[in-house]
Image: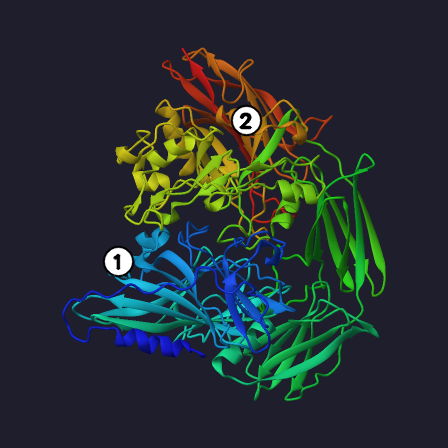
Amino acid sequence: MRRTFAGLVVIALVAGCGDNRECSLEPFKAGDPDGHPEPLGASSMEARAGRIAAADLPHVPSELVTWKEGDFVIANNRIALVIEDVGDSDLYDPWGGRPVGLARVDNREMVEPNNFGELFMLTGRSTVVTDSVSVLADGRDGGPAIIRARGKLHPLPFFDNLIAAVYSETWTDIDATIDYVLAPGADHVDVYVGYASSRAEPKDSPSTLHALMYTERTPAFQPIKGFDPALANAPYVALVDDQATSWAYIPGEGVLGTPINASGFLGAFSAGFTMPACQRIFRLHAKIAIGGPGLDGAVVAAASALGEVVREVSGTVTRGKVSIPNVHIHATDGSGRYLTRGVTDSEGKFSLHVPLGADVTLTAYKRGDQVVTVHAGYQAKAPAIDLPAVGSIAVSAMEAGNPLPVRIQVLPVAPTTIPTVPDNFGETRVTSGRLDVVYAIEGRATVIVPPGRWEVVVSRGYEYEIERRIVDVVANAQVRVDAALDRSVATPSIQCGDFHIHTWRSNDSGDNAIEKVAQAIADGVEMPVRTEHEWVADFEREIGELFATQWAAAFASIEMTSFETWGHMGVFPLTPRPDEVNAGAPKWQTFPTADAPDTEFSTLSPKVVFDNVRERPEAPVIIINHPRGATNYFGYVGYDPATGTARNTADWDTKFSLVEVFNDAHWKQNRDSHVADWFGLLKAGRKVFAVGSSDSHAMSNSPVGYPRTCIQLGTDDPRQLTQNGVRDALAAGHSTVSGGIYVTARLGTAGPGDTVTGAGSPMMVDVTVQAATWIDVDAIDVVVDGETVDTIPVMPGDADPANPAIRWRGQVPVQVRAAGGFVVIAAYAQRTLEPVHPGRTPFGVTNPIFVTP
C-alpha cells in the first residue's frame, strides 16, 4: 500500500495523551537500517532511500564535501540529497543525521555535485543529538522515500554562548526527529521536524531560526535583491555554484526575515510554534529545492517547490559571428529587481527562467569585455547579444632569463574605465581599481581587455623591483609586455611565511584554495601555512597541482576558533588525521554524542585546550591570533600590559611564546595597542615573539603575505624545509616581520631571539634596512625595554649607491636597564604599497634581542 508522510503524521498525533497531565510517550520509531539496495536506481515514477556506496559518490573538485561511504541518500530520477549516518560529524554541528551534500541525478548517477557547506536544523537554540538514522520508507511501494534522524534535543554547542540570549529554552527533555521526504519526480525534499513532548503544559517557541554555514563558497542569492546575504523577507535563499548543482532553502512557513550574517553564518527567523503538552507533532521545517547548474536551475526548482510558474527566455551571445561561451547573462525586470542569472554554453547559447509577467532586461558580462544590455521584454526569444571587439595583453616575466611566478595587474588609465555591473549581480571581485589580476606561476599570462589605455603592473613580492608599463590596446590586436624583474633585496638563508591563511574550507572565506596558493607564491611567500577554522589542512595538493614545489613548502596547521568565546589560536604544526572529526581538530568543548549521551556540555578552559594540544606528537606551538577584544584571548582573560599578567589567572596560560602582533596591520597602527601588549609581556620577563600574518579571507582585499614572518632557516630552498625546523626557529624568535621592509639587527653576533650579556652598559646595534626601490622607508624606531628611545629619519641620501635597496645601514647606540632587557628595531613609511598591495603601509620589525647582566 502506498503511504504518504501525512498519513504517518496522523498516526503519530493519535498517539498523544490528550490531556494536561505529564505523560510518557514512546520514542519515535526507527526504520530500516539500510533501506533500498539501489537507492540511485529510481525510475521517473519512483523515489528511493538507502545507504550509498563509495563508487556512487561523485568526485567533488574542491574536496570540501564531507560525505562518506555508508551515509544515506534519498533520490529520484532528478535529484539526490545525502544524509550523514549516525555518529560524530565533521564541521560545526557535531551530530549525524544532517545533509552533507547534494547533486542532480542523470542516468542513475549523481552528477555535478554542489560545493556543499552546512545546514543546521534548529529548534530555537537546539538541534537533535542523533542516536539513529534509518529509512522509514525506501520507495518500493511507489510513494515518497523517507529518511529519519532521531534523538533528543540539545543546544547546538559551537554557538550556544551567542544564541542563548535569544532563546532561553533548551528543550532537552524533548524527543525529536528530522524526516527527509522526497516524492517521485519532485525537485525538492521536504524536511519535517517531529516532537514528542511529555510536558504537562504547552510552551511557545517565539520564532524559528533557519541557519546555514560556509555560505561564502557558494554565494547566497535571494529573489528581487539578487546576490545579497542580508535576507529581507525572502521567500527563500539559494546557494549558487555556477559550474555545478545549486539549491534553495525554503522555510516551512512564512519568509526569511531579521537576518544574521556574520563569519559565513547566514541565518534568518521565521514564525515560531507552540510545543504541545503530552503530544507528538510534526512541522514542515523547510524545503530543499535542488537544480542547476548555477542560479537559474535553483530558481526553477524553488519555483516548482513553491507552486509558482516561470517562463523561459533564451538567446545567444556572439562576437561578430563567433559564439562566446562562459558569459554571464543577468536578468532584471522593469523595476530593476534582480530575477536570475545564466551562463552561455560552448555554443554561446543561454536559457533563463523568469516570472510570467516580467518585463525582462538582459545584461551580458564577462571580465575583460564591455557590458552589453538588451531589452527582451515579454518575449521568449531574446534579441541577439553581440559583444564588441576586444584586444589582449600578453605578459611574460623573467629573472635572469628564467620564468618566475608573478602577480599581473591591469589598471585603467584615464579616460579608460573598467566595465562594471552592480554588486548584487554577484560577479567575482578583484582588487579595487583593477580590471583584472592574474597570478601567473609560470610567468606568462594573456589578459583580455577592452580597447583603451591600460597600465600593466608585474610584481614578485617585496624582494623584487616591479615593472610598470602603460599600453594602448586596439580592437583585435595584442600588445606584448616583457618584464625583466630584478631581485634587489638580499635575504640569504631566510624564508618568509604567512601563518594565518583561510580558504573556502573555512566557514567565512570564499577563496578557491588553488588560487589562494597561486597568489601567495606570486607575491613571494615561501611558506603559505593553511589555518582553516576548526579543520587541520595544508596546501600540499595545491602546490603540487601548480608544479610549484621549488617556490613554496606546505605545512599543516589550524585556527582554533572557540567561536567568539575565548579567542582564536594558531596551532603549528599539525598533521591532518583524515579518519578523525575535522581532520583531527583539537576539541574545545564537550557535549553528548550518540555513543556517550550523558556527557556534560561544557566549554573547556583555554589552558586545558592548550596543554592538550601541546601533548600531540607534533609538539606544536600556540600562536595567540588577533589577541585584543572581549571575545579574543587577551580581552577574555583581562590581560594588563602594565603588569604582563591577567586578572583571570585560571585561564591565563604562561607557556605561549608567540603572539600575532600584526594581523593585516602595520607598526604605527599597532604601536599603542598590540605592540604595547607584546612589550608588556617582554617587560614582565617572558620570552614572547611577534608573528605577522595576513589573516586573509578574501584575497581581493586582503592579500596573503601582508605582513609576513621571515625566519632564519639556513636555506633558500623551500624543498629543504621541515616542519620541526620551522617550528623550532619560529618558537625561538629567530625571525622578523615584514610588511614590505626588511630589517636586520645584531648585537655583536646575536640576532633576534638571541641573548647577550652587557645589561646596563652602552652597546651598539648593527642595523640594516632594505626595501625595493618602489617601497618607501621614512624612519627607524629604536625600542629599548619597550620604550622608543630614538627615531632616525631615513633620507634618500642614506641609500647605498651600489645597491639602492639598502636604504639605511649603520650602528645604533642602546643601553638596556641594568637588570636586563631587550632591543627591538622597526622601520616604516607613510605612503602605501601601491600599486602592488593598495591600502597597506610599509613596515618591518625585528623580534627582540635580549640583554642580560
**SS under mark 1:** loop
Q: Is residue 281 left or right of residue 359?
A: left
Residue linked to disc 1? 172
Q: Position of residue 41 (x, y in %)?
A: 59, 68
**SS under mark 2:** helix
- Name the residue: 32% across, 64% down: 176
Of the pair 831 and 274, the residue shown nearer to us: 274
Front of the two marks 1 and 2 = 1
The label number, if any, that marks residue 381 in the structure image: none
Q: Is residue 469 left or right of residue 298?
A: right
Three-letter code, disc 2: Asn
Residue 562 falls in image quadrant:
top left
- Name the residue: 58% across, 71% down: 42
Distance from the alpha carbon under mark 1 to that under mark 2:
46 Å
Q: Position of residue 48 (x, y in %)?
A: 52, 69
Residue linked to disc 2? 724
- Name the residue: 35% across, 28% down: 654
Q: Residues within 10 Å of mark 1 (few under 14, many from 20)?
A: some
Contact between marks 1 and 2 (CB within 8 A): the answer is: no
Q: Can you say whether 363 is above or below 542 in the image?
A: below
- Mark found first going from the N terminus, 1 or 2: 1
Of the pair 69 and 643, the residue shown nearer to us: 69
Q: Position of residue 686 (x, y in %)?
A: 38, 24
Q: Quadrant of the N terminus?
A: bottom left
Q: Position of residue 324 (x, y in %)?
A: 77, 69
Task: State whether residue 421 appears in this view.
Answer: no
Three-letter code, disc 1: Thr
- Name the residue: 55% across, 65% down: 39
Q: Can you say whether 226 is above or below 648 in the image?
A: below
Q: Is residue 73 left or right of residue 125?
A: right
